[in-house]
Image (spheres, rainbow, N blue to C red):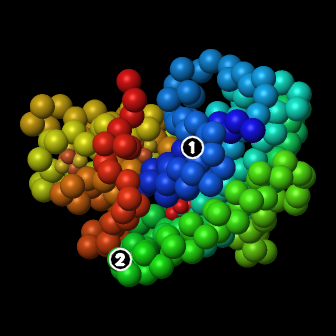
């Protein structure tokens, strides 16, 4: 059966998860949610499966994923599943997604959580390369197991995060979403910036402008994916006072060009 995998990814974890799934499932196409959200056209499916692969944000689903799901218009019988990557706990991400899908006449027939290295540098630095390697090997095994279930096309209960994650999500997810646009005011670039423009090219929502010989300027429509901060080759981008000196994270199998926004 044909599968279309739609992904959203700031640091490559969810993109690589989609690639691994495509390998394990076979006959799969991988498409970026961000570009389709920008186009704003309804997304129709006549048959097959739709896979939504994306990171957990604040124990819930990213705003861009919500916007993407609102565009989905599959025919009856098309199956929808999710793979949610996270650093520790997906909280209520699958439950939120399933609720949104049900409101639109769809539902998750299965949904997985996959732990991968966390990328939220405002709170912690990336794990060391050895630990990253081990975590990614475990993630691949988990994805292979997930693919076996996905292939059966049977309804199974979706993964939920632990109690702690779900409780935290309930408390702060709403505030996180409300603050999204203004949150990019905390970004700045240090004098290490070489005006290379990479931060602007990896931003999935074109929220960064870099003038010739200038520094990046954030435009107030941020999704908080942290791609700009993580992919800057000079580590010139900081977020508030806590990110200086913290190890950055990017999935080691993903090249920066693969993160560039498509025109
Ligand atoms: C804004 C933001 C919020 C996050 N919130 C959570 C969270 O609530 N729980 C968690 O386990 N990981 C959280 N993370 C970590 C990511 O979900 C995790 O690293 C994910 O695999 C990144 O995927 P990507 O590389 O495809 O962007 C968060 C990351 C970001 C940028
Ligand atoms: S990626 Fe880094 S060095 Fe390049 S323009 Fe952006 S801040 Fe400057
Ligand atoms: S400005 Fe940075 S954090 Fe915000 S959406 Fe763009 S790349 Fe992601």
Image quadrant in which you'd find residue 48: top right
Residue 199 located left or right of residue 194: right
Hey, which quadrant is residue 158 in on the image? Answer: bottom right
Please give the name of the residue rendered at 61% of the width and 70% of the height, measured from the top-left corner: 141
**Dot placed on the residue nearer the N-terminal end, 2 or 1:** 1
Is 240 above or below relative to 152? below
Determine if residue 200 is in view.
yes
Q: Is residue 202 visible?
A: no
Question: Where in the figure is residue 202, as x and y percent of width and height?
Answer: 35, 42
Determine whether 60 is above or below 221 in the image: below
Residue named by callout 2: 129
Which residue in the protein does label 1 denote? 7
**From the image, which quarter does the C terminus lie in?**
top left
Residue under the image location 25 percent in, 42 percent down:
198
Q: Residue at x 11, y 47 (%)?
A: 194
Say whether residue 36 is left or right of residue 183: right
In the depicted structure, whether residue 168 falls above or below residue 237: below
Disc 1 on helix, strand or loop? strand
Image x and y of residue 178, in percent: 61, 45
Quadrant containing the N terminus in the rendered view: top right
Label 1: how many residues lie within 10 Å, few (<14), some (14-19) or many (20+)? many
Horizontal relation, residue 75 to residue 123: left or right: right
- Residue 240 vs residue 30, the one in the foreground: 30
């Amino acid at each position: 059966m044909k599968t279309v995998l739609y992904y959203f990814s700031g640091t490559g974890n969810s993109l690589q998860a989609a690639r691994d799934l495509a390998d394990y499932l076979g006959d799969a196409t991988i498409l970026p949610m961000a570009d389709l959200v920008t186009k704003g056209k309804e997304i129709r499916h006549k048959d097959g499966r739709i896979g939504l692969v994306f990171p957990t944000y604040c124990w819930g689903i990213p705003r861009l994923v919500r916007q993407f799901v609102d565009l989905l218009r599959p025919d009856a019988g098309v199956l929808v599943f999710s793979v949610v990557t996270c650093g520790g706990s997906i909280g209520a991400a699958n439950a939120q997604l399933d609720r949104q899908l049900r409101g639109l006449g769809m539902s998750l027939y299965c949904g997985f959580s996959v732990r991968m290295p966390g990328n939220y540098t405002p709170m912690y630095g990336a794990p060391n390369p050895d630990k990253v390697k081990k975590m990614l090997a475990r993630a691949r095994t988990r994805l292979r197991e997930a693919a076996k279930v996905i292939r059966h096309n049977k309804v199974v209960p979706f993964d939920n995060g632990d109690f702690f994650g779900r409780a935290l999500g309930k408390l702060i997810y709403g505030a996180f979403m409300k603050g999204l646009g203004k949150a990019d005011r905390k970004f700045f670039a240090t004098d290490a910036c070489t005006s290379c423009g990479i931060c602007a090219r990896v931003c999935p929502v074109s929220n960064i402008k870099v003038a010739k010989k200038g520094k990046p300027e954030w435009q107030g429509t941020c999704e908080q994916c942290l791609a700009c901060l993580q992919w800057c080759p000079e580590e010139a981008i900081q977020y508030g006072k806590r990110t200086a000196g913290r190890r950055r994270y990017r999935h080691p199998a993903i090249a920066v060009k693969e993160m560039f926004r498509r025109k």
